[in-house]
Image (tube, rainbow, N blue to C red):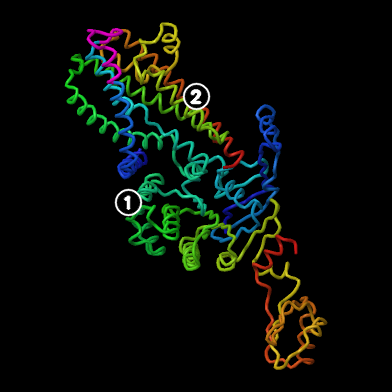
Amino acid sequence: MPVAIETKGLTKDYRSPVKEPGLWGGVKSLFDRKWKDTRAVDGVTFSIEEGELVGFLGANGAGKTTTLKMLSGLLTPTSGEATALGFTPWERRPDFQRSISLVMGQRSQLWWEIPAYETFKLNQAIYGLSEADFRRHLDELVELLELGEHLSVPVKKLSLGQRMRCELAAALLHRPRLLLLDEPTIGLDVVMQKNVREFIKAYNKRSGSTIMLTSHNMTDVVELCRRVIVIEKGRLLYDGALDRLVERYAGHKIMRARFTADVDAADLKSLGTVVKYEDRTATLEVPRERMAASAAALLRTYPVADLNVEEVAIDDIVRRLFTHE
Amino acid sequence: MRTYWVAYQIALQETLQRRSTLLMDRVGGFAIVVSLYSFWTALIGDKATFLGYTREEMLTYVLALNVLRSFVFTGRGWQLVGEISSGKISSYLVRPLSYHGYALALDLAQKTVHVCASFIEVGLLALLVRGGLFLPSDPATWLLFGAAVLMSSLLFFFLEFMISSLAFWTSESGGPLFCFELFLQFAAGAFFPLDVLPEGLRRALEATPFPYMIYFPVRVFLEKVPTSEALSLLGREAMWLAAVYLCAMAVWRRGVRSYAAEGG
């Protein structure tokens, strides 16, 4: 598979003014402004093949959006290299711009007062789509996103979910080969989140486009991405399969046992950490290497009605990764 | 080119859609014209001319102001300031689009609506005051006037664009833009013809690009400038336009670079 995105030591520093507190600090900064450099992205190296759908995870301020902005050409890196679809993004060549799309959940490219259809027509002109291509792409998007009647309603009259779907349609009308999605489900209700997720999945399959998405919503990531890249404080923390992330960062599994009679929760401590015990059901965290032994001991010693062993939920792992629990 | 044509059409729809904003704008402009008219009528009184303007010429000046304000003083500065501060500018910068061309298309749409409205208002006013308007009979005058106004409007567009681009560096660029617009009204002759000013001040202003926006085109229209002088002034206006255009583009490029360096 050809490579869609490749970065080498991608680094971005932001400069921001430092203001001393109080009124006097304000006056001082008027004449003698001090600056502070903050490293938002720190030597990030990864490569993504064409057609991949990769989740980009990190806490707030970890550098996800900054990286996406560099890959879309909005920001110039302080150092390091990146190519996207064979172009250097921040040179902002029209050929590159015609092949990508950046969707930021909280920003809109739609015209507010008039129906979304008009914005689509504008994008048709901007991206130089023939009438036939425009029709074909639009029909497909209308079907996938169930836009139908929303196309002729002024954007300001649409609900957030309807608007987000129109936003996606506007961003995909030119069939970008690379799609950068920043929090595509932010602010949507659960049903709408699901619809948008299904759409992204279907679009990736149908068009073979490369998709990189950031999300705070772990369901987005679990349902969409087989591969994830995790960054923290600008540094790459993990790059690989989502399943492996679980093995690597969860040193334990979850054992859930339901008993036929009351047992003393304190006695269970020898098997692992008791997270919860209620209604004769115990939830324990058991180190991976002791799992078999603990399960055997439990069955041997206690009146077990039912036993379940599960992996730790991915969002738990990611949360722990970020909070260093 | 198609992009800008489509943008023009959409912007036209949107301007018409915002009916109350449009109405307020027009009422505001109309009020200025009415107050200027009353002011000048009071000053002229029974005199045949006042400061070199006949009653008819002064009425024409005031009414022409209404049309010229609509054509010249509509830029996209505030939009640019807003889009830079909110980060919406990003959505344009990632698309294969010239923001200037796009903004010009939007501006043209706004001008179309406002100029049409101003013609109606002027017609109405002319009927109301039943005063004769000065209409040049020489086609050359109309030609010169057209060329001057076209350049004036581009001059204003790029000047405003340049000042609005300051938003790339500071979140307080609304201040300079506001001052600029206020000073401009005065310096361009949008309150009164500049020849009512003391000689020194008038000369100082004439060394700036501002009088080319209103004062100069109206004087051409009123045939107060001989053709040869009008041509040389037109040449100077073209030079100002070129200079302002180049500066605006340079500031814009630097701004975009700084935006790309500092983040939106």
Q: Residue at x 66, y 63 (%)?
A: A240
**Secondary structure of the residue carrying numbered label 2:** helix
Q: Nearer the viewer, residue A255 or B94?
A: A255
In reply to whether residue A288 is colored magenta, the answer given is no
Q: Disc 1 is attached to a residue of which chain?
A: A
Identify the disc placed on residue A319: none
Give the answer, above or below, for where B209 lies relative to A200.
above
Tell me the distance, in whole angstroms, between the alpha carbons under discs 1 and 2: 38 Å
Q: Position of residue B179 (x, y in %)?
A: 48, 26
* Residues rendered magenta in the picture: B37-53
Q: Give yes or no for residue B38 being in the magenta stretch.
A: yes
Residue A170, position as x, y percentages in the image: 42, 53
* Camera-side residue of A10 and B159: B159
Badge nearest the viewer, 1 or 2: 2
Task: Identify residue for label 2.
Answer: B247
Q: Position of residue B47 (x, y in %)?
A: 23, 8
User: Compared with residue B253, is residue B234 higher up or lower down, i.e. above or below?
Assistant: above
**Which amino acid, mark 1?**
Glu
Task: Looking at this view, name the residue that lies furthest to the right.
Answer: A270
Left or right: B14, with A184 as reference point: left
What residue is shown at x 38% (from left), y 34% (from top)?
Answer: B104
Q: Check disc 1 and report the residue beneath it.
A: A131
Q: Quadrant of residue B74?
A: top left
In the rendered structure, the answer to whether residue A239 lies left or right of residue A105 reads right
Q: For residue B231, what is the image quadrant?
A: top left
Are circles 1 and 2 on residues that touch, CB within 8 Å?
no
Report whether mark 1 lies on the same chain as mark 2. no
Q: What residue type is disc 2 on?
A: Cys
